[in-house]
Amino acid sequence: MPPLGIDLRLETIPSRVRNSGVAARLTIEIDAGPEVRDVTLKLVLPEGVQTSDDPLPVRPFALPGGARRQWGTMLYARQTGTHAVQVEATYRIGDGDIIQTRQATLLRAGGMAEGRHHVGAWEVMAVPIEDGPR
């Protein structure tokens, strides 16, 4: 298990759509494997995405082994498209080493083509062209 796991979840709120944008609830959850100290978290938002507030702690904190913490906030994307929402974490492990990591998820605001969207990929239905011209 890694020293610190970060899980990001987005839930689009259809009734909160404003000015051709989209609103979504972001949930940030961290899990400590072994004890970690001096944990700092930073929410990194792309241009065009705003938050109602920054829910993350301002001061560094410690997390005992096996502990879990969770925060939530609303995000608003004013422009259509795909926006990478990131959380950057810096922390100290037992031997004193400092580790920096980043986790991201995608906020999709309208204008997406039909199909299934995976992280970094786009999947659409295809039709074989066996009988087509060659």
Image (cartoon, rainbow, N blue to C red):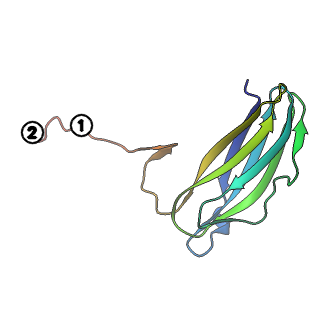
For image coordinates 13% across by 37% down, the residue present is 131
Secondary structure at badge 1 equals: loop
Residue named by callout 1: 128
For image coordinates 69% across by 45% down, the residue present is 8
- Which amino acid lies under the numbered mark 1 shown in the image of this protein? Pro
- Which amino acid lies under the numbered mark 2 shown in the image of this protein? Arg
Which percent across, then down, holds residue 29?
Answer: 77, 42
Q: Is residue 17 left or right of residue 74?
A: left
For image coordinates 89% across by 38% down, the residue present is 62
Q: Is residue 48 above or below residue 115?
A: below
Q: Nearer the viewer, residue 8 or 101?
A: 101
Quadrant assignment, res 68? top right
Q: Residues within 10 Å of mark 2 (few under 14, many from 20)?
A: few
| Quarter of the picture holding the C terminus | top left
Q: From mark 2 to mark 1, how far is it between C-alphas?
A: 13 Å
Which percent across, then down, holds residue 128?
Answer: 24, 37
Q: Is residue 89 left or right of residue 64?
A: left
Residue named by callout 2: 134
For image coordinates 16% across by 34% down, the residue present is 130
Q: Earlier in the sequence, mark 2 or mark 1?
A: 1
Secondary structure at badge 2 equals: loop
Which percent across, then down, holds residue 32?
Answer: 81, 32
| Quarter of the picture holding the N terminus | top right
Q: Nearer the viewer, residue 122 or 125?
A: 122
Badge nearest the viewer, 2 or 1:
2
Q: Is residue 107 left or right of residue 100?
A: left
Quadrant assignment, res 55? bottom right
Which percent across, then down, holds residue 54?
Answer: 78, 60
Q: Is residue 28 above or below residue 94?
A: below
Q: Is residue 29 left or right of residue 57?
A: left
